[in-house]
Image (cartoon, rainbow, N blue to C red):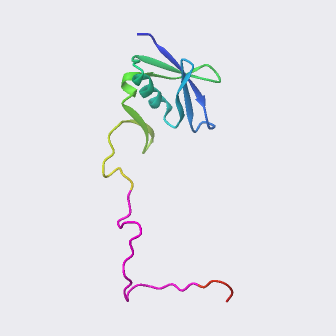
């Protein structure tokens, strides 16, 4: 196994990142560039170590094992970012949705408040 090298480019003043490998951008505008790059390299059949180099300085920014990092993502934890396993979305993880269907209107009752609005001049 040879060690692979990828180049990390800043896309949005450090908020999003592009990753270049063998002249192609394998990750574009990612907030989780290292994990996304590991998944992209793993999908291309690469395994082993990868060193991510800074595009501006040429210095090593990250060194990671493609096999291990491909199954992880970064998540904000109570004390800063951390790596967590990728898992399928569960009912608890899903955003809340409306309880009633869109367009549903219920009949008004005597207990409902009515707000008067005016248009034009008073």
| Above or below, 2 relative to 51 | above
Does the magenta-highlighted stretch encompass residue 106? Answer: yes
| Above or below, 78 relative to 11 | below
Q: Is residue 113 left or right of residue 15?
A: left
Magenta residues span 96-117
State the image quarter where residue 65 is shown. Answer: top left
| x 38%, y 71%: residue | 104
Q: Is residue 122 left or right of residue 67?
A: right
State the image quarter where residue 22 is shown. Answer: top right
User: Which quarter of the figure is the N terminus placed in?
Assistant: top left
| x 48%, y 35%: residue | 32
The x and y percentages for residue 6 are 53, 20
Q: Residue furthest front?
A: 103
Q: Residue furthest right?
A: 121
| x 47%, y 27%: residue | 37
The x and y percentages for residue 120 are 67, 84
């Amino acid at each position: 196994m040879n060690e692979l090298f990828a180049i990390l480019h800043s896309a949005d003043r450090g908020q999003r990142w592009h990753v270049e490998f063998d002249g192609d951008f394998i990750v574009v505008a990612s907030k989780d560039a290292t994990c996304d790059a590991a998944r992209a390299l793993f999908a291309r059949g690469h395994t082993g170590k990868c060193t991510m180099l800074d595009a501006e300085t040429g210095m090593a920014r990250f060194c990671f094992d493609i096999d291990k990092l491909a199954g992880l993502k970064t998540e904000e934890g109570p004390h800063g970012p951390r790596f967590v396993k990728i898992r399928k979305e569960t009912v608890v993880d899903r955003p809340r949705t409306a309880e009633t269907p869109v367009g549903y209107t219920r009949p008004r009752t005597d207990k409902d408040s009515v707000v008067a609005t005016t248009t034009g001049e008073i």
